[in-house]
Image: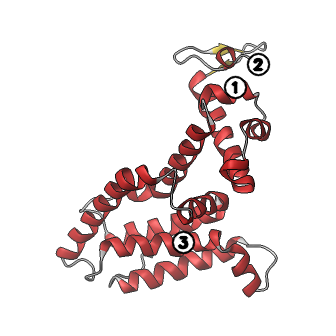
Amino acid sequence: MTNNPVADAPVDGKDLKAGNGRKYRPGRIRERNREKILIAAEEEFAQHGYKGATIQNIAERAGLPKSNVLYYFSNKKRMYSAMFDDILGRWNKVFSDIRPEDDPAEALSTFIRTKVEMSRRYPLASRLFAMEIIQGAPFLMDHLRTNMREWVRGRAEVIQHWIDEGRMAEVDPVQLIFLIWSSTQHYADFQVQILMVENKAEYEQRDFDHAADFLTDVILRGCGLEKPQ
């Protein structure tokens, strides 16, 4: 790989051939590099914070030249913002497409279990988000006021529709979303506390399976719903 970001970056719509004649799809190369950078950014920002993190360190973590990283993200602020867009999209995707005709128990159960799995797979992402919010959301304020507010209102309308049809108990839809967010992310944000209290060195898969079962059962019962088989 060269140090020329333009040369290294793929050109959409064309296949690039390696020396062995194999074809590489530029879009997939671009997507893979972007993913590497964002994963590296999560690690760097989590360890050093926004002020202490550097593009050079992120490039080294990603195994890419700094110039190549700057091709995808022109500065640290853009990378930080893109990282949170990726985190939030990852968290909420499964609940973004809910519809009034969906089964509330199935939809809520899937959302809870997916969020617990996100805590298992991406604990750094959850902690980064928590730190950003605790600090007053200096980089996320616009997102919270616009995209997130709209997302929550849209999901709350669907939940309210289920309530109005008598398909679940009368609960506050927005508070329900807050509850699911906080309870599922707890296992990532407060990992040290949980492990110390339970006298464990590290999490096991069964810990997350148990947490998902417990939260699903408690939250659904509070909504007057039965846990799906």
Q: Which mark is residue 184?
A: 3
- Numbered marks: total: 3
Distance, label 3 to label 1, CA atoms, is 36 Å
Circles 1 and 2, Cβ within 8 Å, touching? The answer is yes
Q: Residue 229: x, y in percent?
A: 45, 76
- In the image, what residue occupies the spot 78% across and 20% down? 1
Task: Out of 30 and 46, give the one closest to the viewer.
Answer: 46
- In the image, what residue occupies the spot 28% across and 69% down? 159
Q: Which mark is residue 68?
A: 1
Horizontal placement of 198 versus 210: left or right? right
Q: Callout 1: helix, strand or loop?
A: helix
Distance, label 3 to label 2, CA atoms, is 42 Å
Q: Earlier in the sequence, mark 3 or mark 2?
A: 2
Instruction: Locate residue 34: give its quadrant.
Output: top right
- In the image, what residue occupies the spot 52% across and 65% down? 115
Dot 1 amino acid type: Asn
The residue identified by callout 2 is 3
Q: Callout 3: helix, strand or loop?
A: helix
Instruction: Locate residue 11: give its quadrant.
Output: top right
Horizontal placement of 222 versus 54: left or right? left
Q: Earlier in the sequence, mark 1 or mark 2?
A: 2
Dot 3 amino acid type: Thr
Which is in the foreground here, disc 3 or disc 1? 1
